[in-house]
Structures are given as structure tokens and as C-alpha cells.
Image: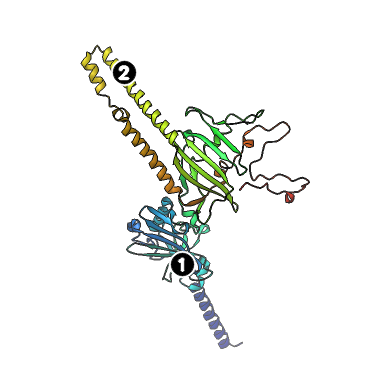
Amino acid sequence: MNAKTFRLLVAAAVLALIAAIWTNIGNRPASEESESANVALFPHLRDQVNDVASITIAGAGNKPFVTLKRANDGWQVGERGGYAADVGKLREFLLKLADATVIETKTSNPKRYTELGIEDTSAADAKGVLVTLAGVKDPVKLIIGLFNGGGGGGTFVRRDGEAQSLLAKGNLLAEKDPAAWIKHDLASVDADRIKQVSITGIDGKVLRVYKDTTADVNFKIADVPKGREPASEYVANSLGSGLSNLRIDDVASAKDVPAPEKAFKIHYLAFGGLAVDVTAWDANGKNAAQFVASNDPAQLDSDIVAGQAKAKAAYETEVATAKLKVVEAKGDDAAIAKAEADIVKPPSLVDAGKDAAQRREAAEKVVADLNRKFGGSTFFVPAYEFANFNKGMEELLKPLPGKTAAPAPGIKLPLPGATSPLQQLPLPQGG
């Protein structure tokens, strides 16, 4: 090989190496520091968060996953029939977007978008989601891709319509399940307020537990069969907590998921007169329930009378105490009269009829507020909530001699002759 040929080969190799390096740099996600580092992803969003009127989260084929809209009475989830949204979760997500800053720029090569999950969501196989915020002066459209947890944190994103992709600070991933955006706290009636719980099973058998007074610590079981005993003195207490901190997993329209004829019927009665009727059933493997609130007239009237009597007794005790202090101080009749006059009479002593009407109005407002939450919906509740709706008498009693305790619905027991887990089937759940 002569010198000239050697020089030509070396030159060709150098050019090939330069071309390869240039191509590699052009194709790989950029990671060098740039002017965009530490700059807000959406500089004006922080000042416009309260102006956001809707949030849309769409995926492959631009199919909407979640539609959140602001209404007169708060935020709603469109895919759940306008059910109330979790405002805390929603606001947290908006503030994450508003506070997000750019860590570094990444690729602007569309061929590399799929690696970061930031390809256009019009694609049928798009991995990321397009988040659109409407109602703000500067509309927001952001394609949110993969979370770069293993690379020190941050989320790959691309502003819709821009070629440049970015690594933004924090976890900006958006939930694609509408159920994740609903308000999960449904209602709460403390167990201490519950006077009685009646559960009518699918077989028509009734289990009733009750308290005689608010001072009772434990619920009693009514109509215990002769010769049987409760498993413990507190075994029925869990039934009284069925409406305490009641949470839901999901919700659907009652028209779409109606209650069947055969279902558990639960009636809660509170000492104040509040009543809540629950219909619970197994809806294709989900724990479904519907709720209706009302006031029990007899219990409400009794509570009003008791409340007015309590207010009167408290007033008379306060007056007697004040008079005694004046007498002990050797005050005259005028001082005694003044001491009594200085104590404000409760409304029930000023106008008993008006006070009773106001108490009824307050009770009706509680019912109306609950039914606004309950109305027209079928709720899907966690298993631990549903366990308070499908109890039977046997589950609360000591087992008969020679028998084991009754299993909770859904517990698997070996069938006769079964020798392996594959031969064991779940006992059927009612409803």
C-alpha cells in the first residue's frame, strides 16, 4: 500500500467517524445544560390556577380518559355522570403543573419520542397522555410521558405543538382512571349516634342490634335464639359503624346499575331521628350499595322533646347556682333577681313551638344534604365497608357445640373430597 492510498483510507475513516458521531448526537435525547433549565414549564399558570374551568386527560387516538369540569356547586367528573370530584387531588395536580420547572431539554427528534412516551396522542398506540387546561388566559396543552424515577426523578413531557421535549421536575403523571378523581368520602354518621341497625338478608331473616341509651357502650343483639349466646359483649359494635367515615371506590348511575330484587336491606336509626336505608348487593364481583336518608318522625319528635327538656334543666341549674352565689354573698332580693335575669334563656323556654320548628328544619337539612350525595347513584364500596351490610345472626353468636364459627361471606372452605386448592370453590355470596 503506497502512502497516498493510506492517507485516503485514513481520511475516509475520519469522515465516517464524524458522521456517526453527528448522527448519534442528533438522535439521542439531549442532556446538556441549556437556557431552559430551572425555568417554569408554564410561567403564567401559577397566577391562573383559580381560573381553570376544565381539565381533560386524553390518551391514544385522542380518546378522553377523564373530563373534569367546574360547575356551580363544585368540580365534577364527566365520566361518572357529573359526580363530585376530589377537589384536593385536583388542586394538587394543578399546582404540580404550575410549579413544574425544566430540568433539562431532551430530544426534538420525533423518531425518539416513543422512548420517552411523548409521541402525539393522535397515534393509536401512544403511551402518554395529553392534558388540556381550559379557561385560563394562556391555555395549557401538555403531553406527559414516562416518569424518570430511576434517573433521579422528573417526568418526560412535551408541550403540544412543539418539537422539543423536556425533563420536568417532579412526578407529573396524570391518573387515567375516572374513579381516581371522584370524591371518595361519602358520608359519616358516628357510631355513637346510632340507636339501632336492622339487616334483612336475602333469605328474609332479620338481624337487629340496638342500644337503649346513648350512654350504652355496646350494641345488644335482639332475638338471640334460645340456648345461644353472643360471641362477645362487643361483637355487634362493628355493625353500628357502617356509616362512620363511609368511603367509596367508584360510582355509577343508579339507572345503569340498578339494585336487584334480592339484596341486603339495612336500616340505620340514629337517636336524633336520622334514618338511612341501604340496599347492598354483589354487582358482578363489585360491592354495590345505594343509600337513602330520611327522618323517623317518632324518633325525631322524641329527640326534640328530650333536647328541650335538657336545655330547660341546664338553664334551671345555672339559675340556681347563680342565686346560691348571691345568697352566700348576703345579697338582697334585687341582686338575686338580677342574677337570674343575667342568664340567657334557651330558645325552647322563650318559644317552645318556634324552637321545635327550627330543630325539625335543621334535621331536614341534614337529610337533604345527605340525599344530594346519595341520590341517583350506585356506589361501589370497599370490602371492609360491605362487611357491615351483609352480616347474619350466626356470625355474631358462639358456635354450637361440635361446630365451628360461621364463615364470613366469600370465605373459601374445602368441599367434601377436595384434596387440593384447585378443588376448592368459594361459597356463594348472597345477592
Residue 30's place in the image compared with 233, above or below, is below
Q: Residues within 10 Å of mark 2 (few under 14, many from 20)?
A: some
Q: Position of residue 136 (x, y in %)?
A: 34, 62
Quadrant of the image occupied by residue 42: bottom left
Amino acid tagged 2: Ala
Q: Residue at x 36, y 59 (%)?
A: 53
Any mark on residue 320, and which? 2
Q: Is residue 183 left or right of residue 358?
A: right
Looking at the rendered image, the disc whose residue lies closer to the viewer, 1 or 2, is: 2
Helix, strand or loop under label 2:
helix
Tell me the quadrant of the picture where the N terminus can be found. bottom right
* Whole-number angstrom distance, CA of label 1 to CA of label 2: 81 Å
Depth check, front residue: 55 or 267? 267
Picture residue at 40% right of the left edge, 45% below the top: 369
Visible in this render: residue 124?
Answer: yes
Residue 272 in sight from this viewpoint: no
Please give the label number shown on residue 337. none
Depth check: give the residue in front, 270 or 54.
Answer: 270
Residue with the mark numbered 1: 106
Which one is in front, 232 or 22?
232
Crowding near pointer 1: few (<14 within 10 Å), some, many (20+)? many
Give the amino acid at mark 1.
Answer: Lys
Name the residue rendered at 48%, 33% in the picture.
192
Q: Is residue 157 above or below residue 208?
A: below
414 horizontally vs 232: left or right: right
Element class at badge 1: loop
